[in-house]
Image (cartoon, rainbow, N blue to C red):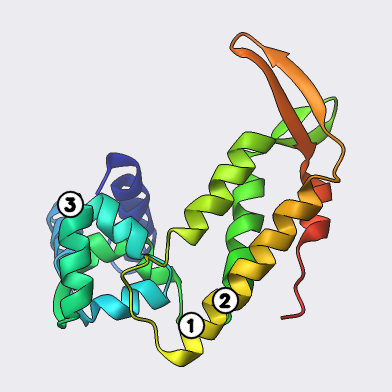
Amino acid sequence: MNDHIKSRFKLSILFWASFCVNFDDINFKVFLDIIINYILNMKIQIFPNDLVKRCVWDNYTYYVLGSEKEAERILLENNQFDISERDALVIGLLKVIETPNLIHRFNAYMTDFLSNKSITNDRMLKIRKKTLVSAIDRFRGKFPEYWKADAVYQNGINDLYKYLDNLLEEMECVEVELITDQFGTHEFLLSKSIKKLLTFNY
């Protein structure tokens, strides 16, 4: 777990514990460390297949396994295993639920992406086109080709890919603005124009 995530997690525990423990208690730090270590060392039993369905397999491969070859082997075998609470927090497993409505999941992902990656220019939020296209491609990568999806999820993937293809086509009709910085000239799109292309009635 990186220091930023761990610090935020500690602050959350600290806030909760402040209602239970007197800050003047010399044992408070010991109490806090026990709580944090207990939670971060908890185990969750899960199948690799479930990580793909929750759209976090790519994160698990990158942050935990570090090997695409090992990831393929584990997913094909699909044996239940223990994932630590620490790793579950890092890959985002604790904040998602399983749903075959992958278009809805993508829309949430894209809304969050635009909120975090857009820049303010001339009082308008804008997103670099190249960065946006890369983010869309990364979402496709959440469902590796070697994954054997069931019929329900395969239909969800097929619908998602059609949706993404249509989105990329519609993006070509969005007005492009050229912005120059110290690294060169880049194509930007209005973030609100991209949000309008997302369909939330799936």
Q: Quadrant of the C terminus?
A: bottom right
Side of 73 where 110 appears, left or right: right
Location of residue 16 in the rendering, given as x and y in whole percent from the top left corner: 37, 65
* Residue assigned mark 1: 154
**Residue 193: % across, % down:** 83, 48
Q: SS for tag 3? A: helix
Few, some or many residues within 10 Å of mark 1 (<14, 14–19, 20+): some
- Give the labeled residue for mark 2: 158
Identify residue type, mark 3: Lys
- Tag 2: Cα neighbours inside 10 Å, few (<14), some, or many (≥20)? few
Seen at 73% across and 58% down, the residue is 167
User: First in sequence: mark 1 or mark 3?
Assistant: 3
Residue at image mark 3:
29
Asked if the residues shown at circle 2 and circle 3 are in contact, with their CB atoms under 8 angstroms apart, the answer is no
Q: In this view of the protein, which residue sits in the foreground, 62 or 172?
A: 172
Decide: marks 1, 2 in contact (CB < 8 A)? yes
- Answer above or below: position of 193 versus 124: below
Q: CA distance from mark 1 to mark 2?
A: 6 Å
Q: Earlier in the sequence, mark 2 or mark 3?
A: 3
Element carrying mark 2: helix
Q: Residue at x 79, y 45 (%)?
A: 172
Quadrant of the image occupied by residue 166: bottom right
Amino acid beneath label 1? Gln
Q: Tell me how far mark 1 sits from mark 3, CA to CA.
A: 49 Å
Foreground of the two, 17 or 41: 41
Q: Which residue is at 34% across, 48% downward?
A: 5
Of labels 2 and 3, the one closer to you: 2
The answer to whether 15 appears left or right of 136 in the picture is left
| Residue 75 visible | yes
